[in-house]
Amino acid sequence: MARIKVLSREVSELIAAGEVIERPASVIKELVENSIDAGATHITVEIKNGGTTYMKIVDDGCGISSDDIATAFLRHATSKVNEKSDLDNIATLGFRGEALASIAAVARVEVLSKQANDEFGVNYIIEGSVERLNQKTGCPDGTTIIVRDLFYNVPARQKFMKKDVTEANAISFILQKLSLSHPDVAIKLIRDNRLDFNTTGDGTLYSAIYSIYGKNFAHDLIEVDFKENGISITGFTIKPLYAKHNRSFQNFIVNGRYIRSIACSTALEEAYKNLIMVGKFPACVLKIDVPPSIIDVNVHPAKIEVRFSDDKLIFNSIYFAIKNALMKSGLIYEFQMKKSNDWLSMKEEPEDFQQHTLAQASATQNQKQVAYEQEENKKRVDESVIIMPDDEEMDEFEGDKAAKAIEKINSTQIDENDKQEIEIGAFKYISRSSFVKSRQEALKPEEEYDKPKPTLRIIGEAFLNYVLAEVEDSLIIIDKHAAHERIIYEKLKTQSNKNTESQFLITPYKVLLSIDEYDAMLGSSEELERMGFKLDFDNKPYVSAIAIPTDLEKLDMDEVIPEIAHNLYMNKINPQTDLLDEMYHTLACKAAIKANDKNSIEELKLLAEQVYFDENIRHCPHGRPVMFSLSKGKIEKQFKRG
C-alpha cells in the first residue's frame, strides 16, 4: 500500500473546485447569487460558446473593496457567516466561501469592482488560483466579473463539456430559476451577442413568470395563497388542463432559494391526482417561506437541495395550498375564440419552448404509463431545448421513499366519514373527502350561503355526446360520458370502505383468465368482495361471478372481469400503479353513459346539474375536462354585437 501524504495545494484546490464547479452553468449560478446577495437590482450576464470560453456578469451591487478583493478569492472566505450559530439562520444564497476560490482554480478570472463611497475601484486578475494583477482603477459602482477558458488547466474536465447549445441552455435554465426566485431583480441574458431574455425586476412574481415562460403559460395559472403553522406559500400553479410533459416547469422557491425537492414534488402531484392525464405533470412557481431554523441549506455543494426538519409539515402545507387554489378556481374552462372561420375552439396547450417531445404509447392505461416511464428514462434530450441540469436525478423520483410512502397512503383504507389522520414515515394523510368537506364551506364567500342556485336550462345535445345548457349568462358544454364517468368514480370511492350492495345472479358469469391474472384476482378477493363482487375461484383458471355490484348490473361481466384482472396483474408487476384507482377507473368507464347513447332531457338535466353544482366534478378520472363555458358576451362579440 502506498504511503499516506498530504496533497499539494494545487491538486487539493482542483479537487475542491470540482465539487462546486461542474459546468459553465455552475459558475453563473454562484456569481449571480453573489450579485443578488450584494444587493444588486440589475444583473446582466453575457456568454459566448455556451460559457466555455467567455462569461461576463455585471451588477450594480455594493461592490468589493480593494482591501478585501484578494481575501475574497481564498477558500472559506465569506462575509455572510461569522459564528457557528449563524448556520442555523442562513438568509443569503451564498455562504460557504467556496465559489470564487473554486472558479479561480479552474479558469482565468478578471474582476472590476467599486464601492459607492470609494474614489477608485479595483482591477484584480487571478488564473489557476495564482494572482496576476491587483491594482486600483476607475470603474462604475458595482462588480463586473469576466471568466475565460473554463477548465483550461484540467483537460480531462473539458472532455465532459457538452455542445455549446446544451451548456448555454443550462445557463439559461439557471438564470430563469434565479429570475423567478428574485422578481425584484432585473436579470438579462445575452447569448452569443443576442438577447435571450430580460426580466423587468418590478417585484411581482407574475411579471417574472410572464417574462420567462411567456403569455400562454402565464394565462393558464391559478393563484396560490396559503398561510398556516408558520409557513407561507404563495405563487401560482397550473390549471390541470394545461399540465406539462415533464417536471421542468415545477419551481419551488424556499426562502428565496430555488431548490429541487422530492417531498415538494410529491405533495404537488398528489394534490393534482385524478385531475391530470397519465404521463403529464403539474407546473407551478411556489414561494415557500419557512423559519430558517427548520431548514438546512448546507447539504449540497451547489446548494440546490435542502433538508427540512419536518418533511410532514412541508408536505401537508403544499398539498393543502394547491388543493385550496384548485377548489377556489372552480376549474370551469372557457372556450378560446379564434379569429378564423373556425370560430369556436377549445384553448390548446401552447408549445412552450422548454417542453420535451415524448412518444405516445398505444396500449392500455397501465401500459401507457410503463411505456412513458421507460421512454423518459431512456430518451436523450434534444440539444435545442432547455433542460434541467442533472435532471436525471429527478428520474429517480418514482422510486423514492417519499413516493412509496404516498403509494402506501393511497392504498390505506380510511373511513371517509372520519377526519382520521394517518402517519406513514414522514408523511401525514388526511382523508381527501374529509379535507374537501372541511375546506369547501370555509372557501365560500359569506354572501353565497343565502344565495339561491342559478337555474340550469337544457338546450339540447350535440353529436349525441355533448350536453348544451344555459346558466345565467353562459353557455355550458358538458361531455356526458366523461362527466358521468367521474360521477360514478367518486361514488365508488366514497363507498370503498363500506360493503357495497350486491346483486346475486341467476346464472353466474364464468370467465377464462390467464394464470397470472387469475392469481392476481385471487390475491385481491377481499377488496373485490368489499366492492360488491362475490367470486368463485374453485375452477382455476376460470373465475365465476356469483354476485356483482348493484350499480353495475347492466354491464357485460365478460368484458369487465377480464379488464379488472388485467389491472390487478399490472399492479403486481408495477406496484406504482394505484390498485383501487385503476379498478374504479375501469368500472366507472364501463358503467358511464356512452357517446351516441340516447338520453331524455330529464336525464341530461340531472347529469348537468350534478356536474355544474359539484366542484369535484371538473375532470374525468384520467384528467380530461368534463365541461367548458362560453359567455354570452363572447358569443355576441363574434356576431359583432359586443
Image (spheres, helix red, strand yellow):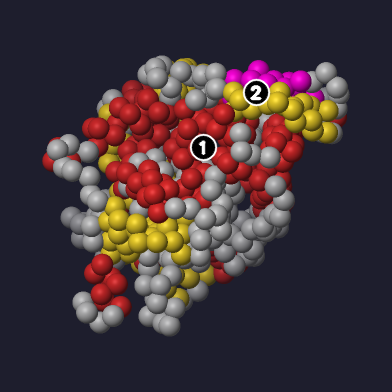
For discs 2 and 1, the disc positioned in front in the rendered view: 2
Which badge, 2 or 1, is on the more N-terminal residue? 1
Q: Which residue is drawn at 42% across and 58% down?
A: 467
The structure residue drawn at horizontal position 40% and vertical position 28%, both measured from the top left corner, is: 433
- The residue that disc 1 covers is 489
Res. 470 in view: yes
Q: Where is residue 480 in the image (x, y as percent from the top left)?
A: 48, 52
Three-letter residue code for mark 1 = Tyr
Quadrant location, the N terminus:
top right
> Can you say whether 493 is above or below 13 in the image?
above
Image coords of residue 357 (percent x, y):
61, 61
Q: Distance between the residues labelled 2 and 1?
A: 22 Å
Q: As shown in the figure, which amino acid type bears the numbered disc 2?
A: Phe
Mark 2 lies on a secondary structure that is strand
Q: Which residue is drawn at 43% across and 83% down?
A: 341
Which segment did they paint magenta?
A: 518-536
Judge by depth and name the residue closer to the eye, 422 or 210: 422
Residue 220 seen in render? no
Residue closest to the eye, 537 or 235: 537
In the rendered structure, the answer to whether residue 235 lies left or right of residue 360 reads: left
Labelled disc at residue 504: 2
Question: For the point 58% across and 41% down, which residue is it?
Answer: 591
| Quadrant of the image occupied by residue 502 | top right
Is the magenta region chiefly helix, strand or loop?
A: helix
Residue 579 pos. (x, y %): 63, 30
